[in-house]
Amino acid sequence: MTWKPDPSFYPSPKMAMQAPPEHHGYVVALNYGRNDKPDVLCTVDLNPDSSTYSQIINTLEMPYAGDELHHFGWNACSSALCPYAPHPHLERRYLIAPGLRSSRIYIIDTKPDPIRPQISKIIEPEEVFARSGYSRLHTVHCGPDAIYVNALTSANGNEGPGGIFMLDHFNFNVLGPWEIDRGSQDLAYDFWWHISQDTMITSEWGKPSQFENGLVPEDIINSKYGRNLHFWDLRKRKKIQTIDLGKEHQLVFELRPAHDPTKTHGFVGVVLSLKDLSSSIWVWYKDGDKWAAKKVIEIPAEAADPEDLPPALKDFKAVPPLVTDIDLSLDDKFLYVSCWGTGEMHQYDVTDHFNPKLTGKVQVGGIVRRTEHPKSNGPLLGGPQMVEISRDGRRVYFTNSLYSTIDDQFYPDKLGGWMVKLNTDPNGGISLDKDFFIDFGETRSHQIRLEGGDASTDSFCYPS
């Protein structure tokens, strides 16, 4: 704890965009399928003036194997400056890294040496189960009153409802489940909020039996994966509305609300349409006293020779885009969309959020194309997956691994991890940084967190 606000906290997204550029970042990466090594947290050099630029400069190995580190986040962020924040003097110091498969949580201290962080506490799965009632941990967000973590199912089995629990800001004890009244909500995936509206939004993936050994084709065809958006009263911790996106829309994934607290819209990616294997982006918005949702982007599947497709796709004779992650720049102007199947990163101008315009596209990897990077050693497996934007919006980073067994389902040749950087034009347009390519070898790279915060870390309570 400090006696003045952390200098990486900013009242508004506009002020955060004036922050100094990141010099390093952290990437969680897993070992799966070829060795019994534990997952790792890699520190990567992002300073173009450094002699080790575009290299892994430290690797922190977890003490247990098989965690499946997935999404992670900071213990504190700019939400600590909200007018009602009870803890304004928190530090952005600890990374909260949960295991999606193990339900174990690592508290990782980035101070005093940010390049070589250390594990300072481990919350064992039994404590998570007993105090929260949940398992299969997924997303972490720093809130003004606690650290929020969501989970995909209950502690006592594979089929109970998923939900959210809270960690104490100071000692990281599990405080308990967040929901007071969940209503009919059952499936879970991502969550985020409009703090100024006292509204939380959650999305849906599936039960552990539907993803831990890979996606289940029969369940996709029978519309048994998630297709709903849920809206919650953030203060009363009560579900207030559900929007069904329709039976054909399966796997409702990443949520990206507008950063400016005066805005009440956000974006969500839908991985698959049963109609034509397309992916889509929807915008949610306030319609009177209710929330509404509308499809605003549709990305079609591409015809492909069955000989070039994995077994799961051969009968369809097409490669779906598989939009598995999206990210929104801090000025709420550009939305980045990862097409993990076709191997494309799209940039859309969403200034008019009901009428996005495609302003840029790059090709790397892909199920069929396997497009090389200028610095890669041959064709690449995997495609743009977890995407992160610098606070000023000028640099975009992405990795290629989705989830261990699903990686092998769509890329059965067993992909290795890599990380790529894009440079952006403030007026629209993206280009591949030909000098930036990090090869993680057999270790599969997943989510990225940037020094001092990024575009999917902080919540702001003051308008730009």
Image: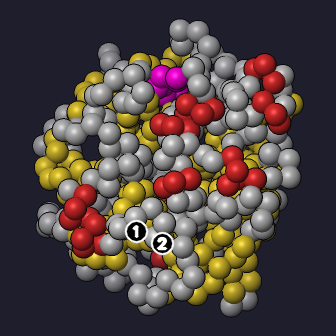
Mark drawn on residue 154: 1
Q: Nearer the viewer, residue 257 or 238?
A: 238
| Residue drawn 13% across the image and 43% down it | 112
Q: Main secondary structure of the magenta part?
A: strand
Disc 1 is placed on an element classified as: strand
- When the figure is inspected, residue 328 is found, relative to residue 405, above or below; the finding is below
Relative image position of residue 233 (x, y in whole percent): 51, 86
Relative image position of residue 255 (x, y in whole percent): 58, 61
**Image quarter of residue 127:** bottom left
**Residue type (three-letter) at the residue carrying disc 1:** Ser
Q: Is residue 167 visible?
A: no
Sequence-wise first label, 1 or 2: 1
Mark drawn on residue 113: none
Disc 2 is placed on an element classified as: loop
Specify whether residue 351 is painted magenta: no
Distance of label 1 from label 2 (alpha carbons)? 6 Å
Side (left or right) of 17 relative to 51: right
Circle 1 crowding by C-alpha within 10 Å: few under 14, some 14–19, many from 20: many
Side (left or right) of 442 relative to 348: left
Q: What residue range appears in magenta?
A: 414-422
Identify residue for label 2: 161
Q: Nearer the viewer, residue 451 or 31?
A: 31
Side (left or right) of 151 relative to 267: left
Relative image position of residue 413 (x, y in whole percent): 57, 20
**Residue type (three-letter) at the residue carrying disc 2:** Pro
Q: Nearer the viewer, residue 70 or 221?
A: 221
**Image quarter of residue 230:** bottom right
**Image quarter of residue 294:** bottom right
Specify whether residue 418 is painted magenta: yes
| Residue drawn 64% across the image and 36% down it | 340
